[in-house]
Amino acid sequence: MTAPTANLSRRRRIGRWRPLTDNPVFIKEIRGRMRGARAFVVLTFYLALLGAFTGLMYLAVAESAMSVSGQTNVGEIGRTLFVSIVAIEMLLVSFIAPAFTAGAISGEREHQTFDLLRTTLLGPASFVLGKLLSSMLYVLLLLLAAVPLQSIAFFFGGVAETEVILSFVILIVTALLFSTVGVFYSARSHRTLSASVLTYASVAFFTFGLPIMVGAVLLMFGFSFNNVQSSTPQIALLYLLGALICTNPAATALMTQWVLLNQQTIGAFTYTLAGGETITLISPWIPFTALYLTLTLIFFVLAVRRVRTIEN
Amino acid sequence: MADELIIETQGLTKRYGKLVAVNNLSLQVPRGAIYGFVGPNGAGKTTTMRILTTLITPTAGDAYVAGYSVVDYPREVRRAIGYMPDFFGVYDDMKVWEYLDFFAACYEIPERERAGLINDLLALVDLTHRRDDMVEKLSRGMKQRLSLARTLAHDPEVLILDEPASGLDPRARIEIRELLVEMARMGKTIFFSSHILADVAEICTHLGIIESGEIVAQGTVTEIRRQLMPAREILITLLDRIDAAKETLMHIEGVTGIHDMPDDHGRRRIRVDFTGDDEGVSQLLMALSARGIPVVNFAEETHDLETVFMRATKGIVS
C-alpha cells in the first residue's frame, strides 16, 4: 500500500484561520452557556453582590466624606466607589473566569466526548480557542453588565474616562490570562476537580500569594519609597519592586491610578528620588498587559500542544 | 474493486508496559465488506480500533485506512472514517439537531449544507420526530442511532463501530443491525466489533476472530468455517448393517474418521469426518447405496458460527 505524498498535510498541520462563527466549539459553547437558568443565575448573583457591595461602600464613604471636612467632597465619594467596584469586579472575575475554563477540556474527557472530537477534522488550536473565547465572551458580558454600577461613580464625579478604560483593560487582560491558565490545566488533567484545584492555586498565587510574599520581604527590610537614595542597588530595588507590581492586577490597577493622578500620564514619567536624582518609570499597566498577554500566549500554546498529543 | 483493501494492518503491535494488548496483528478488510471483529472482552478489539481511528499510536507496525497510514496521515484517515466508540459521548445541553450540526461543523461541512444533511441523517435513523429534543432525553437505542447518524455526517468511506449493539434491548439491537445493512447498501465499508457472535453472524460478510491480541482466523464467513473446521461432518442414519457401512466408507479417500453416535429411537447412527468437496459427499452416498446398505438419513451437519467461534477460541472465552 502506498501512501500518497503529494501536497498532503503531515501530522503537524497549521490550522487555517477561520472566522469565529465558523468555530464549531465556540458556537456550541455559547449556545450551551446561555441555555437554561445557570448563566442568568450567575449574572444575577454577580450583579447583586456587586450592587450590595457598592451600596455598602456608598454608605460608608458618604458618612466619612461628610464628617471629616464638614463639607462633602463628592469627587472623593465617586473615586472611592469606583475603586471599590473595580476591586470587587477584579476579585469576582479572577475567580469566575477560570471556573468556566477549568472544566472545558477535562469535562470533554469526563463526558467521553474528547475522543469523538479528536477523530474529527477539528484542529487542536480551534478546539482550545473555541473553549477560551466562548468563556471570555461571558466574562465580557459580566464586565459590561457592571458598567451601569461603575457609572454611579461618574454621577459623583472625580473619575476620568481614562481610568474607566484602563481598569477595563486590566480586568480583561486578567480574565484572559486566568481563563487560559484554566484551559491549560484542563488540557493536562483527566479530572475537572484537579484542573480546578491547580487553576485556583495558580490564580491565588498571582492575586494574593505573590503580593503577600513581596510585602513580607519589604517589611523585613523596612523598605520605603520615600527614602530611596541615589545608590545603584536602591534604584535597582525600586525597579524590581515596580516589576513585581506589574505581576499583580490589583497592585497594577492601584499604581496605574496613582501615576495617573500624581503624574498625569498613562505612559512614561520621571520620578525624582529623595536624593534629587530623577529616574524614568513607566505606568505599570503597560508592562502588566505585555506580561499577561505573553503568559496567555504561552499557556495557550502549551494547552494546544497537550491537546494535540496522541496518547501512547 | 472487490479485492481492494480499505483497512490493512501490518504487524500491528501495542504494548502497555509488559502487557501486550495487540500482538503482531494483520487485518485485511476489503472495500464494501461488513466485517465483524469478534473476540472476548479484553482481547484487544478496542485497542485495535483506537489505533485505526488515530486515537493512540501503535508500538510497532502500521495500519492503513483508505490507503493512508494512521501514523503519518492521521488527518486523511480521520476524513475517511466515521467512528463510534463503545460508549455514547453525551453533551447534556444539546438538542438532537445541534448535536449533528456540531459534528458536521467539526468535519468542516459548510453551514448552508448542514440543515439538509441533518434532515437526511435524521430520516435515515428514524429520529426526525425527535429533532428538537434534548439529547439526554433520548432512549439508549435512540442515542445509539443518533451516534450512527453522526458517524455518517462527513460521508466517510469506512465506519468503525465499537460494540454498536452492546447494552441495547433486542428491538434496538435489530434496528441497529438493519441500519448497518442499510449503510453497507449505501456503499460504506463497515468494520464493527462485538463479543456477541449472534450479532455478527447474521449480517457480516467477513469475520476476524481475535483473542489475546492475536488474530485467530479471518476471511469470509465461509472461509472461516473451512479454516476452523477442516473436516465436514456427515451424519448418517442406518436401518441396519452398520459394520458394512463403516467398512465401505473407511476405504473412500477423504474420510478421516468414523464415529459411532448414540442411537436415535433405535436407529443406528454414525458420524463421518470427510475432507472432500460436494462431489465427494455424493460419492459417499452412492457407495453406500451400491452395496445396498439401507440409509435412512444422510445429512451434512452445518455448524453455526457459535461452534466455530468456541473452537477457535478454545474455550478461553470469558
Image (tube, rainbow, N blue to C red):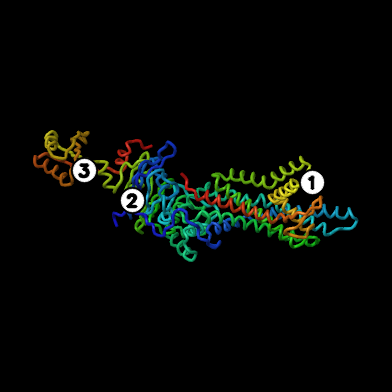
Q: Is residue B75 above or below residue B42?
A: below
Residue A231 x %, y %: 77, 47
Q: Quarter holding the N terminus of chain B?
A: bottom left
Looking at the image, residue B64 sits to the left or right of residue A305; the answer is left
Which residue is tagged 3? B300
Q: Outermost residue toward the left?
A: B291
* Nearest-to-viewer mark from 3 and 2: 2
Amino acid on which the number 3 mark rests in the picture: Glu
Q: Chain of mark 3?
A: B
For the residues beneath circles 2 and 1, the answer to whether they share a chain is: no
Marks 2 and 1, how far apart in space? Answer: 77 Å
Marks 1 and 3, how far apart in space? Answer: 103 Å
Amino acid on which the number 2 mark rests in the picture: Val
Q: Is residue B197 above or below residue A296?
A: above
Kindly identify which numbered label has been placed on residue A281.
none
Residue A235 x %, y %: 75, 48
Which residue is tagged 1? A224
Looking at the image, residue A12 sits to the left or right of residue B297; the answer is right
Q: Secondary structure at mark 3?
A: strand
Q: Nearer the viewer, residue B16 or A36?
A: B16
Q: Quarter holding the C terminus of chain B?
A: top left
Looking at the image, residue A305 sits to the left or right of residue A219; the answer is left
